[in-house]
Amino acid sequence: MSEEQPAMPVILEALDPKHTPKDLIFIALWTLATIPAIYLPLTHGTFIQVIFGLPMVLFIPGYALIAALFPEKDDIDGIERVALSFGLSIAVVPLIGLALNYTPWGIRLEPILISLIAFTLAMLIAAHWRRALLPADRRFVVPFREMASEAKAELFPEEQSQLDRALSVILVLAILAAVVTTVYVIVVPKEGEHFTEFYILGAGGKAADYPTTFSAGSEQSLIIGIGNHEYREVPYTVEVLLTNQTFNEATNTSQINAMERLDQFTVTVPHNETVERPYNFTVTNTEMNRLQFLLFNETVPSDAVWNKDRINASYRDLHLWITVRPTAR
């Protein structure tokens, strides 16, 4: 009957960094390096962020889980381990997102990143512990040195001629160039359509409960939103106009009988950002029946351009039909 392995040596070995498997150390370092890769201004939005982020979503959580489930080298072979790592990552990440959806934190970058890191580190600790419980000859180990030696022997065998060596170097460089090109295409896609979002919301932040009927002189509130997708920072100008507008059934056209400027202001919005600005206004003229919002980019026409011409000259335009009741005396 074989003697049981003492618990204390196992604990000491599991806590000794010298005995930590190199694959678990590598995965842990990559996991922790994802944090600065995402949040440092130097790497934020660059290909470095993608290089660290994609494995964190597609491979690393599954690898850590597989390492915890199968600590022995004979449990599954290397190809199965890699394939299952991808498959389980694709399953684990959505499940974490689903769980976060029912928490106060919701599905946002910070909660997802923290959850993935916590899950991965927990699985790595479990994998390290389970491997420490096994005899050394039964533990799964990634043979980094053997893999490097085999790759070197395949690419640069000792009996290879100078020409063959040169061709091998060219082949390796071509493969690296293909990988770099693929990463570049993924990280730096072609510019899409250039456009600007322009919208108004009710005071509650929803596309409802707009101030359309109110008394003259009463203060009303809504939200003006601008989303910049122009691939550059844009200094937008917003004009708020009041018009008296009627519809001519004979000509099937609308006619502006009167127009006055209620307000004008500038909002500078960086690319790929959205600004929502609370806006308060007061209407005293009971004859006005339409509240017009005009958005201009860098070019704002002079006041000589008025009525329909000014509306047509705007980059984007919105409106609310309003009823202004006389103030009760």
Image (cartoon, rainbow, N blue to C red):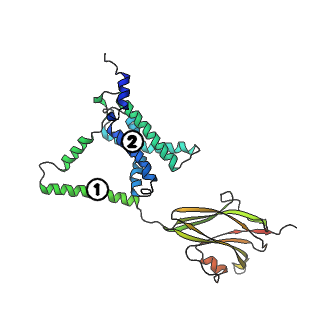
Asked which quadrant contains residue 131, the reply is top left
How many C-alpha atoms fall within 10 Å of the one at disc 2: few (<14), some, or many (≥20)? some
How far from the left and from the top, in percent, is residue 7?
Answer: 38, 23
Type of amino acid at the residue the image marks with label 2: Ala
Q: Nearer the viewer, residue 307 or 235?
A: 235
The count of marks equals 2
- Does the rendering let one see residue 240? no
Which mark, residue 176? 1
Quick one: which residue is furthest to the top in this view?
A: 1
Asked which quadrant contains residue 84, the reply is top left
Type of amino acid at the residue the image marks with label 1: Leu
Mark 1 secondary-structure assignment? helix
On-image quarter of the C terminus = bottom right
On-image quarter of the N terminus = top left
Mark 2, residue position: 28
Asked which quadrant contains residue 4, the reply is top left
Q: Is residue 194 above or below residue 123?
A: below
Q: Is residue 264 left or right of residue 5?
A: right
How many C-alpha atoms fall within 10 Å of the one at disc 1: few (<14), some, or many (≥20)? few
Which residue: 44% across, 37% down? Answer: 122
* Mark earlier in primary sequence (1, 2): 2
Q: Is residue 83 above or below residue 277?
A: above
Which residue: 13% across, 48% down? Answer: 158
